Image (spheres, helix red, strand yellow):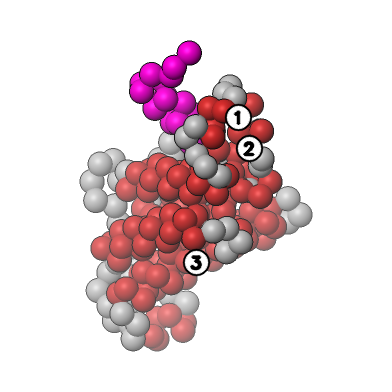
Amino acid sequence: MKVTKEKSAENRARLIETAGRLFRERGIDGVGVAEICKQAGLTHGALYAQFSTKQDIAAEALAHGQELGYRCLMDTNGGRPPTLDHFLEYYLSMETRDNLAGSCAMSASASEIGRQDENVSASFTDGFNKVAKAIEAAEGPNALGPSTRERALTITAALIGGVAVARGVAKANPALSEEVLQALKNVLGTIGEGATPEVVREGKRSSKPARTLSRRP
């Protein structure tokens, strides 16, 4: 029986959502096509009618997951433009650390992107640049030597890598995992505020009180 355009689009969306969740949970190399089809409730034929290779679905699933993560990141201030503190509190939270399947696709996949093809790399690149631009817009005035763009790139890369490290040590040393997240908040916040070199060397932040932000489940 011929599949309608509507059903085909529904199947594609289901495959992308399922693949993205599984890739975040287990890694791209840790999930096969058969498992994606099984979890999505579709046949191999339905998948290959939409995607030529596993790399094709990986690229789209990564892009989809990054877009969902970006929307959550941009909504950390109740619909108002978020500050850098909002980004840091959201991204470096225990909830983000512990929610592999539902949080940032970049922190879940960063270590294996270099082993994937160009399309997957392009999806990761687009997501990284999008977050970096948002962080650049949220930064304070630049009193440091590096440009605003350089600081944004540094903060974005540190967020992705930092969450990966916090996850990596969490089971063996939960206290260290929390220490990593808190250290990143302190140091990246100082960099993003454009503090003077003396403040950075002395490890001081601004005098404004730390914010406690509500979390979505």
Around disc 3, counting alpha carbons within 10 Å, would you say few (fewer than 14), some (14 to 19), or many (20 or more)? some
Q: Main secondary structure of the magenta part?
A: helix
Q: In the rendered view, tell whether residue 13 sits above or below residue 72.
A: above
Q: Which mark is residue 158?
A: 3
Mark 1 — residue?
Answer: 44
Around disc 2, counting alpha carbons within 10 Å, would you say few (fewer than 14), some (14 to 19), or many (20 or more)? some
Work out whether mark 3 precedes mark 1 in sequence or the reverse, and give the earlier one.
1
Work out whether mark 1 precedes mark 2 in sequence or the reverse, and give the earlier one.
2
Number of labels in the image equals 3
Disc 1 and disc 2 in contact, CB within 8 angstroms: yes
C-alpha distance separating marks 3 and 2? 32 Å
Residue 209 visible? The answer is: no
Span colored in magenta: 1-16
Determine which quarter of the picture holds residue 199: bottom left
Q: In the rendered view, tell whether residue 56 sits above or below residue 124.
A: above
Q: Is residue 23 left or right of residue 169?
A: left
